[in-house]
Amino acid sequence: MARGDQIFTLQPLAAIQGLYEHHGIDCGDGTVVHLRKGNATIEQTSLAEFALGRPVSRRLYSTCYLPDTVIDRARSRLGERADYNLLFNNCEHFATWCKTGVHHSQQVEDFLPFLSRAQLETLSEPLRVALETGPAGETEQLVDRALDDLKAVWNEVQPRYRHAIAEARSWNRVARAALHRKREDLARAALHRKRAFERQAALDKDTLDRLARVTEMVLRARTVPARGAH
């Protein structure tokens, strides 16, 4: 790590380990300027307090401000009470602004495809709050992209689920026919294939159920007027 670096650690989000990157600016003197999620305040703390014992990485840029400028930009906002939002105004938005002048969060860009695999029960509340309190225009764009990603995964999983169900039924018929012919060896092999397809179907059914719940939540968020809407 070097003076003026944008650094981050992996932290849990809603009990999912390693999902959320907490970003800050390394001041080169053992301190970091960062936006704390808990009190939504931009503070300068020790590196140890920033990292909380977790490994620290740095974000590399091909073009960015010089280290002195980055630190000056970060310190110019010390004490600011930020209007924190998980998706639209988080610690990465702040740190990236310090480095490049652009208010951007790459992890939010990468987040939407994760929705299809997420443990919705642990994510739904923070995600719902973020969508319902985000800027109107940005929220609509994010919801539309989320729905596109969810639809793509649905279109991939649903045919596989239907195929697995059909195959399980087919192999069950093969097993019955083999037993009728007193071919227990063939029956056992057919039942093995049947169980494999049943396991696949169960996994896909769980994914489809989760997709349906996420889609419902995102659609509900779309119907709630976001802050800044008129």
Image (spheres, helix red, strand yellow):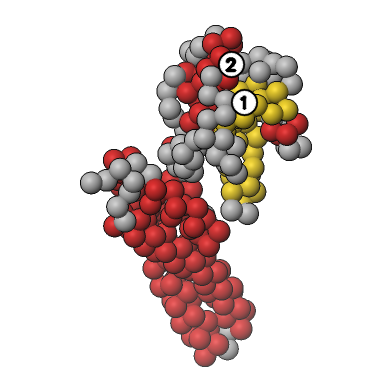
The residue lying toward the viewer, choosing from 185 and 138, is 138
Residue 177 in picture, x, y percent from top left: 49, 85
- From the viewer's perspective, tell me whether residue 214 is left or right of residue 41: left
Residue 43 in picture, x, y percent from top left: 62, 30
The residue lying toward the viewer, choosing from 97 and 217, is 97
* Type of amino acid at the residue the image marks with label 2: Ile
Residue drawn at 65 percent across, 34 percent down: 9
Quarter of the image containing the N terminus? top right
Q: Residue 102 occupies which quadrant of the picture?
A: top left
- From the viewer's perspective, tell me whether residue 59 is left or right of residue 130: right
Residue 167, compared with residue 224, is above or below; it is below
Q: Which mark is residue 125?
A: none
Tell me, yes or no, if residue 202 can be seen here.
Answer: yes
User: What residue is disc 1 on?
Assistant: 33
- From the viewer's perspective, tell me whether residue 70 is left or right of residue 216: right
Residue 137 in picture, x, y percent from top left: 29, 40
Q: CA distance from mark 1 to mark 2?
A: 8 Å
